């Protein structure tokens, strides 16, 4: 097998931030999934990874030369309650590689056995939840949303006890890094300021190297993380994704989506949608994701504060508090700008309308910045909620309306005419844009401008998402029958989220309302 060329800065530069540990051996490893395009991107040889040596590697039975497996330590707020020590209870960072684009990437196991941070858990994972990570992570990647990704899944030949006995598996995950808000919280809570500074400087060198050694670099790091998270959450919202467990240990510094446990995609539009079986109070509901991101960032700000001012210098402390508070207060505006930019694209708009103002740093958590376009989008969503219309298909059929045929959109409403008043407003806004653009003279829905708009909208409004019932049927077949056919078929469809292929129409159909109403997801631990 072509060797993996590891360069493990975390192990080398951050002693005391982890425990060196070995993955558990498994009795009968079998490859269930290999992400060949990702392997190639990492500079690995996919063909070599298909064989027994690759299977042994992905199972954890063989540790490749140059790898330095370790369990990272971190803390975290979980559903608002603070745990001073969490850490990789069933995961190991195998090492780091430099990919073909010159980017440093972590390669890590999930489900590789107990570690000192397992807290009584078995350290194992089941086939279903690990294949869910594959499906959702690769769907997010295809949608252009920053995400950790699955490189491989191997069945272990063991059974793990969850709601019943389930077939075991190990996931190999790739990430820009596994640094989390909770990583900073661990050392800040313990008052280990030298390690906290070491961690912050390592993070800056890895993710924001332009800040290295600069005055004010720690508040600048906070701002960079906040801006990345603002863009990420806006992307989640614009595709109807619900993470389900936005604890501080599940918020990355890199701005990638991580930990696809009780996650799901919304069907009928409702900001209060919750699918997670453990989110009893709706803390991580779809509509709460931006405020929770801000809350998590405030916890990162608290962790970084000791690096910005000597606690004995009251004036310096007050100045530092003011600086981080300004970043946290700016988050809703950054998020609102990113959300509105995405919504404009989804509406087929390329420019701000009269009265619009991009980047209002005073935006509220609902991200209505007072602009005409923001109000147009909010009223559209209110209409979808009022009539229980599928979020994904509504946007997609709006593109049909741009091309001149509004009937597929009207068909989504029990009262077909209910959408007409809003459509008139939207058409007027489109005509306003067309009249002031190079498309003037061909303005109007159904015209050349309308066809161009429809084409743009179909590039940003997916037709296929990981419909929850399709995900569940694929995972059930893989887990209970060992049949991966549905999994592979669904995976192929998810790689083409914007292509409207009649042969894939069943992947675009929502589940029956009664199925969605009762649907729950689980963390898999």
Image: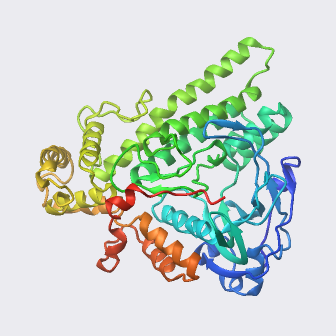
- Residue 391 higher or lower than 183, as above or below: below
Residue at x-position 84% and y-position 38%: 195
Between residue 336 and residue 298, name the one nearer to us. Answer: 298
Tally the marks.
0
Residue at x-position 72% and y-position 12%: 315
Between residue 346 and residue 70, name the one nearer to us. Answer: 70
User: Percent position (x, y) of residue 52?
Assistant: 75, 86
Residue 79 lies left or right of residue 287; in this view the side is right
User: Percent position (x, y) of residue 490?
Assistant: 46, 75
Residue at x-position 46% and y-position 79%: 489
Between residue 211 and residue 48, name the one nearer to us. Answer: 48
User: Percent position (x, y) of residue 159?
Assistant: 71, 73
The quarter of the image holding the C terminus is bottom right
Q: Quadrant of residue 369?
A: top left
Between residue 24 and residue 69, name the one nearer to us. Answer: 24
Residue at x-position 75% and y-position 45%: 74
- Residue 362 higher or lower than 21, as above or below: above
Residue 466 makes an appearance in the image: no
Residue 522 makes an appearance in the image: yes
User: Percent position (x, y) of residue 88?
Assistant: 76, 54
Q: Quadrant of residue 322?
A: top right
The quarter of the image holding the N terminus is bottom right
Colouring mode (rainbow / by chain / secondary structure / one colour): rainbow
Q: Quadrant of residue 462?
A: bottom left
């Amino acid at each position: 097998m072509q060797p993996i060329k590891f360069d493990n800065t975390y192990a080398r530069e951050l002693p005391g931030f982890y425990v060196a540990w070995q993955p558990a051996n498994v009795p009968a490893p079998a490859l269930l999934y290999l992400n060949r395009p990702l392997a190639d991107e990492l500079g690995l040889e996919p063909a070599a990874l298909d064989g027994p040596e690759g299977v042994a590697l992905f199972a954890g039975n063989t540790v490749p030369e140059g790898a330095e497996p370790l369990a990272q330590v971190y803390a975290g707020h979980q559903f608002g309650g603070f745990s001073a020590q969490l850490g990789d209870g069933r995961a190991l960072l195998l090492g780091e590689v430099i990919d073909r684009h010159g980017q440093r990437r972590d390669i890590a196991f999930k489900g590789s056995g107990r570690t000192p941070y397992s807290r009584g858990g078995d350290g194992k994972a089941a086939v279903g939840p690990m294949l869910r990570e594959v499906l959702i992570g690769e769907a997010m990647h295809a949608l252009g949303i920053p995400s950790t990704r699955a490189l491989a899944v191997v069945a272990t030949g063991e059974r793990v006890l969850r709601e019943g006995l389930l077939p075991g598996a190990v996931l190999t995950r790739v990430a820009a890094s596994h640094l989390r808000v909770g990583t900073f919280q661990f050392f800040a809570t313990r008052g280990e300021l030298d390690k906290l500074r070491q961690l912050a400087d390592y993070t800056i060198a890895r993710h924001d190297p332009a800040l290295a050694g600069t005055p004010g670099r720690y508040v600048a790091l906070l701002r960079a993380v906040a801006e990345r998270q603002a863009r990420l959450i806006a992307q989640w919202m614009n595709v109807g994704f619900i993470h389900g467990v936005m604890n501080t240990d599940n918020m990355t510094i890199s701005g990638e989506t991580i930990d696809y446990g009780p996650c799901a995609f919304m069907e009928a539009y409702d900001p209060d949608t919750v699918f997670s079986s453990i989110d009893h109070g709706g803390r991580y509901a779809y509509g709460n994701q931006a405020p929770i991101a801000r809350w998590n960032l405030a916890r990162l700000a608290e962790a970084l504060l000791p690096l910005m001012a000597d606690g004995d210098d009251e004036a310096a402390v007050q100045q530092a508090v003011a600086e981080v508070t300004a970043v946290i207060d700016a988050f809703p505006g950054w998020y609102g700008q990113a959300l509105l930019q995405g919504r404009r694209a989804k509406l087929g708009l390329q420019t701000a309308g009269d009265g619009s103002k991009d980047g209002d740093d005073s935006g509220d958590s609902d991200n209505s910045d007072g602009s005409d376009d923001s109000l147009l989008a909010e009223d559209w969503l209110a209409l979808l909620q009022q009539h229980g219309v599928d979020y994904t298909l509504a946007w997609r059929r709006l593109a049909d309306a741009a091309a001149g045929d509004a009937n597929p959109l009207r068909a989504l409403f029990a009262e077909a005419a209910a959408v007409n008043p809003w459509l008139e407003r939207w058409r007027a806004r489109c005509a306003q844009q067309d009249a002031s653009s190079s498309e003037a003279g061909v303005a109007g829905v159904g015209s050349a401008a309308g066809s161009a708009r429809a084409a743009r909208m179909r590039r940003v409004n997916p037709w296929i998402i990981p419909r929850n019932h399709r995900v569940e049927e694929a995972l059930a077949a893989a887990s209970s029958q060992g049949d991966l056919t549905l999994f592979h078929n669904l995976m192929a469809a998810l790689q083409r989220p914007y292509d409207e292929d009649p042969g894939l129409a069943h992947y675009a159909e929502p589940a029956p309302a009664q199925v969605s109403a009762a649907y729950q997801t689980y963390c898999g631990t």
